[in-house]
Image (cartoon, helix red, strand yellow):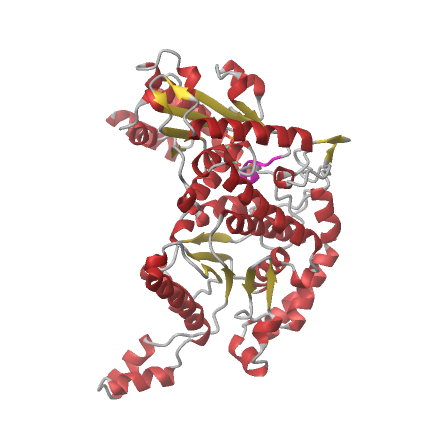
Amino acid sequence: MWDKLKTLAETQGAGQILDLFAADPSRFEGFSARADGLLFDYSKTSIDAEVLQALLDLTEAADLPARREAMFSGEKINETEGRAVLHTALRNLDADPVLVDGQDVMPEVLSTLSRMEAFATSLRDGSFTGQGGAITDVVNIGIGGSDLGPVMATLALAPYCDGPRVHYVSNVDGAHIHDTLQGLNPETTLVIVASKTFTTIETMTNAATARDWMAEKVIDPSAQFAALSTSASLTGEWGIPAERVFGFEDWVGGRYSMWGPIGLPVMIAVGPENFRDFLSGAQAMDKHFRTAPAAENLPVLLALVGIWHNQGLGHGTRAVLPYEQRLLRLPAYLQQLEMESNGKRVAMDGSDLTQPSGPVVWGEPGTNGQHAFYQLIHQGTRVVPCEFMMGINGFEGDLKHQHDLLLANCLAQSEALMMGRSLEEARGLMQKAGLEGAELERQARHRVFPGNRPSTTLLYPKLTPFVFGQIVALYEHRVFVEGVVLGINSFDQWGVELGKELARTLSPILAGTEPATGKDGSTRGLIAAIRGAQ
Ligand SMILES: O=P(O)(O)OC[C@H]1O[C@H](O)[C@H](O)[C@@H](O)[C@@H]1O
């Protein structure tokens, strides 16, 4: 199966995208797909009918439909941790039963959702009070999956944020919590400690700092703390009363968790109704993913484009480029989602992967990226497949001219990447500028764009909570499909453990209570330099 893809990559993959358009001017129709108002255009890639078929064959060989059903129906597909993978249950608003170990999880999911809604409402209408009255500010303390999604969502849904101000603290660097708490009034602040495990050192350290800060002014700080976690016992031990603990189960992976309790700060910011719309959008994408034929299925197609570029053509990086300022943190969120999920070197059965694992994901909102790193994308020696996205409509009606300029820029970039500029054209420009001879030639060469560089565009009507939910779920399922095709378990993250273990051994060495024996020479040298200057 992979052989076929590799052969196609070698023979036609260098990808004369322009030739494909010349041969089939209506290629856009055949190589784009729609789902509930979203339009995914992948015609500006070198995928043709034969490549698409070879990619679809890979999904067949990997038994994608059965794997997908196994996920949705609660089978323990996270085999290295013995867990089901059911973030989709958190947005299963129809409440169709979902069984884990023979038990329907939906009653618990929906009752937690109602408790979150009641709590969020009481904060928003001022009926829940701190020592100093209604809550004005919420500080969410969490990291990784307990931070990136909610941070991204709060920024993305800014036009809907009409509740208390929500702030996020993640880094163990004391600067983060210091700068966040500065200027807040402890008597009107609620602190949410968000941690699936409730053991993460960064989060627990920041939570203790926040509690000390609050205790300076507030007689009973625990009355202004809430917790989001799978561990009822640890949240209880930490002193957070059960009525403000919102629990979830281990079948929700950290980076897939913002649909449930981890989304509470978002719900507080935008209100329960908008949060439900966000869940509905994701649910609509779940239904599409589960039912649409593979060749029209957005998550499948997005995954296949990724596989063609990375495993097929060897482009080991992809840029995510939202032309939407409010999706500022989407690239950071996708870095965790994609790289923690598919950055693995062994397959589910423990054997070495036969293909490269997931790509390096990065990006920035347009148009800012244009003025920073697009130079490399257009003229560098490596090809960076680009994933553009843009909303047809913005929210700032009186600034429509700016939105139109934004859209024009997005379209211009994918056009420039594909069309390029030939040496002939560049020479013409230099001639017009009055150059001649060797100087004309030299200057012209700098102005050549190779073209035929691939990109996809995701077009959506407007960044409403529903659409935002669709987009995030689209990327979640894309990661799943890529993982299935590669034979990876996308739901564990053993690669983050070693550094955590070593940090634990290094803390006492840095504090001087333990010797640095056993550490390598570089680490010992750095420790000595730090200790000598502290
Ligand atoms: O939510 P927590 O248990 O505090 O975990 C926070 C994060 O830390 C871990 O190291 C993992 O790499 C992430 O997947 C997780 O989201």
Tell me the quadrant of the picture where the N terminus can be found.
bottom right
Please tell me which residue is depicted at 25% across the width and 25% down the height of the picture: 534
Residue 508 image offset from top left, x and y in percent = 40, 20
- Give the left or right position of residue 68, taking residue 222 as reference: right
Q: Relative to 142, say whether 305 is above or below.
A: below
- Give the left or right position of residue 52, taking residue 310 as reference: right
Please tell me which residue is depicted at 70% across the width and 48% down the height of the picture: 68
Residue toward you, 232 or 277 = 277
- Give the left or right position of residue 473, taking residue 70 as reference: left
Q: Residue furthest left?
A: 434
Residue 124 appears in the rendering:
yes
Q: Is residue 415 magenta?
A: no
Residue 18 image offset from top left, x and y in percent = 51, 78
Range covered by the magenta-colored residues = 252-256
Residue 183 image offset from top left, x and y in percent = 27, 28
Q: In the figure, residue 203 lies in which quadrant? A: top left
Please tell me which residue is depicted at 54% across the width and 72% down the height of the picture: 14
Q: Relative to 233, say whether 478 is above or below.
A: below
Q: Is residue 254 magenta?
A: yes
Residue toward you, 320 or 89 = 89
Q: In the figure, residue 305 lies in which quadrant? A: bottom right
Please tell me which residue is depicted at 46% across the width and 40% down the height of the picture: 148
Residue 163 image offset from top left, x and y in percent = 40, 35
